[in-house]
Image (cartoon, coloured by chain):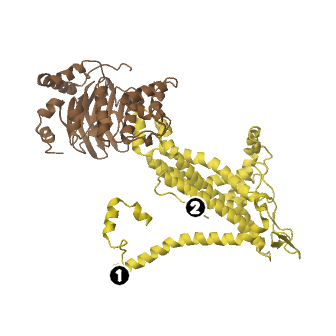
Amino acid sequence: MRARQRGSAAVRAAAAGWPGRRRRLADADLSRADRILRTVLLVGTAVPALVLLFITAEMVLSALPALIYAGGDFFTHQLFTFGNLYATGQSVAHGVRAPLGASYGAAPFIIGTIASSAVALVIAVPVSVGAVLALVELVPRPVQPALSVFLELLAGIPSVAYGFWGVLYFGPAMAQHLYPVLTRLGVVLPFMRGPVGAGEGLLTTGFILAVMIIPIIASTTRELVRTVPALAREGALALGMTRYETLRAVTLPYIRSGILAASILGWARAIGETMAVLMISGDLLNTLPANIYSPFSSIAATIVDLLDSALTDPTGMAVHALAAIGVVLLVISLASNLVGRLLIRRVALGALPVGRGI
Amino acid sequence: MIAGVNRFLVPRFPAVNERARTVEAVAAGVSAAGASALARTARAGTGVAVDGLRVRFGAREVVHGVTVGFHAHRVTALIGPTGCGKTTVLRALNRLHDGRPGVHISGSVRIGDEEVYDPRADVRDLRRRIGMLFQRPNPFPLSIRENIALAARIHGLWSRQDAAERTEAILREVGLWEAVRDRLGQAPFLLSGGQQQLLCLARALAVEPDVLLLDEPTSSLDPGTTARIEELISALRDKMTIIIVTHNLQQARRVADEVCLLLDGEVVEQAPADRFFQAPADERSRAYVDGRVG
């Protein structure tokens, strides 16, 4: 009904000529092949929506007991323990029973997840945007595709390889050479103060996550740069402005909101990253990170880390607790993806590269 | 305005000069309007001389050796059917084809006594001296104020102190001041198409060009704004050399002092507008003016 009202006057006039509603194609009008195609298309459309709905519902239902048990402490407490799985007694809170001493405070994971991906974003956005603009403006045209391929190839490196390299070589090397220098920034930024630790922590993870999301932000930005009308750029060139002035006056303002959207997509990817974070984070539970070099743990990494022992909880509450932090991840991830996509649609981008899942 | 080289046409181009002389002779003999146009050329100004211009896109040559003179303080209309190379010639004048893959340009373009395609030429300053208005308005995605002032500041013509005053003066000149005075800080995309085109014209005028290139500047505009822009073209003639590409013959009649007809990348005829429309010398011009071709 709504759609019909929005149609043009001509369409409405034509529609008025029909008896009653607009006639739909009867099944008899369709060939057998058409009907099969229609069924396949309908199923294809329904599957992603149903999967998303099903997973969300299942996660929320599974998380409920732990969320009720923890109440508001879930977001504020730092202690996350499944309790004594062999004790005979039980802890009861808000009418829900859990193993003795169980506490489901998720604050360190939530903060660790957001902090590590924020660090990644701060590093990745300038690098990606700079790389793309250099690619478009500096690199000779014949070389551009070759260099673009490298950006895309970066997305093809398995995250476990990043994790392995990060924990064995990159992290220690950074802790030895770069981080001591960075502590001097502590004068201005308190969270940059030492100690720097052994290289497993927020900053190392941020670097690795940055490398992992650069392809996403860069390829989205490249598509954005392509949407800048040639006419707008020529307007600047015809005024005697250089390529760099044109970049500042035309290209960057055009893609500004798009870069924001691309960053949000990259961020959504970073918060969900599991394996590399698990290997590099230092896996620190029950404590908030003290500085930017500090070990931490993220939601995704913790779920993988603790799932085995959670399955041994006879009350099932441990699994509910992991589901609860999983829901937090799901909500952050869906919300940021949604916001990113809405923003991108606003800048009228055609095809956009989708965040790669693991 | 920085005093240009103040030459009507460049003596080093015999072909151009010869044509120019013929044109003047005919103009002097034919009409009073032609004669007044001739009188205007005596004043100082920067003419543009194109000699043997060839433009090739890959293997396809689009402009086959065009030789034409654009006189200072006159409006010259480049006319011809779609695809005849008008816009290609126009864009060659301010080197807007530069950097496009597969474009080859030969021949000479001179503005004043400066060779545009001289490898040592200062392309930035050349483009500053040659303003351009495009088929569709293309304001910057910046505030209205910045649209006007940015290029002028970059070229060191305006300082931050006098920018506001000069912005107002230029906006008044194009007749846009009343419409935008309260929203100078806003983006230009909320303005109507016609207002945006006037803004682009103001932007071009802010850098004090000697030559103004107009590439079908009114093809996307309403009649009111079209009339306004045509008025401005006539008024600006006193300050600069104006070259307008149009395939609207009525517009060429209204604004042009001189007409140059291009067909298939070649100049068919260049003549004062009155004579061109009343008594074209070439049979193909007559066919085009009568609407039998194009």
- Element assignment for label 1: helix
Q: How many marks?
A: 2
Q: Is A34 situated above or below A343?
A: below
Identity of the residue drawn at 46% across and 76% down: A40
Q: In which quarter of the view is residue B280 placed? A: top left
Q: In which quarter of the view is residue A152 placed? A: bottom right
Name which residue type carries label 2. Answer: Arg
| Residue under numbered circle 2 | A356
Chain B painted colour: brown
Chain A painted colour: yellow
Q: Residue B231: horizontal and vertical position, in percent?
A: 29, 30
Q: Residue A243: horizontal and vertical position, in percent?
A: 46, 37
Q: Residue A313: horizontal and vertical position, in percent?
A: 80, 74
Find residue B84 and name its label: none
Task: Tell me the chain of label 2.
Answer: A
For the residue pair A107 and A126, the one nearer the viewer reads as A107
* Left or right of A100, for residue B232: left
Find residue A28 and name its label: 1
- Element assignment for label 2: loop
Q: Is residue A282 visible?
A: no
